[in-house]
Image: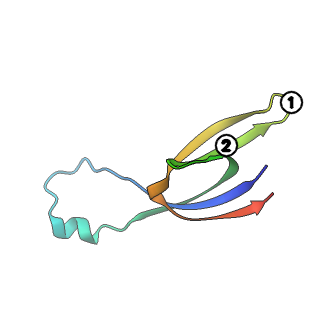
Amino acid sequence: MKIVKVVWEDAWSSSESDWTRAMLQKEPKMMLTSVGYLINDGPDGMDLGMEYCPAQENYRKIQHIPKQYIVSFVTLEE
């Protein structure tokens, strides 16, 4: 079972109105880092489990990261 670290760019939204293109270009990207058990690495994205229960062979706190948002990933443990 692999434990991976994924760096990815998150989507964001704003409730403020009246954005200009120039304002959006200045807005910093929201870069995040997630660490977890690699459940799936498919064409649409990566699925990570934050907790694993060996007795029941299941995961909790699942996170799906779309492939196009992933900047990099490394395996921390096999």
Closer to us: 31 or 74: 74
Left or right: where 75 falls relative to 63 = right
**Residue 64 appears in which quarter of the rendering?**
top right
The residue lying furthest to the top in this view is: 56
Residue type beneath disc 1: Ala
**Residue 77 appears in which quarter of the rendering?**
bottom right
Closer to us: 36 or 2: 2
Which of the labelled discs sits on residue 49, or is there none?
A: 2
Residue at 25% in and 47% down? 15
- Is disc 1 surrounded by few (<14), some (14 to 19) or many (20+) residues within 10 Å? few
- Of the image marks 2 and 1, the number of the one nearer the N terminus: 2
Q: Is residue 78 visible?
A: yes
Residue 78: x percent and y percent? 81, 57
Left or right: where 72 falls relative to 9 = right
Q: Is residue 9 visible?
A: no
Would you say the residues marked 2 and 1 are in contact, meaning their CB atoms lie under 8 Å apart? Answer: no
The CA distance from mark 2 to mark 1 is: 15 Å
Residue type beneath disc 2: Gly
Residue at 81% in and 28% down? 56
Residue 52: x percent and y percent? 76, 39
Closer to us: 32 or 73: 73
The residue lying furthest to the right in this view is: 55
- Kindly state the secondary structure of the residue where label 2 is placed: strand
Which of the labelled discs sits on residue 55, or is there none?
A: 1
Residue at 38% in and 53% down? 11
Closer to us: 21 or 69: 69
Task: Name above or below for residue 70 compared with residue 57.
Answer: below
Task: Name above or below for residue 37 compared with residue 4.
Answer: above
- Kindly state the secondary structure of the residue where label 1 is placed: loop
Which of the labelled discs sits on residue 25, or is there none?
A: none
Left or right: where 47 falls relative to 71 = right
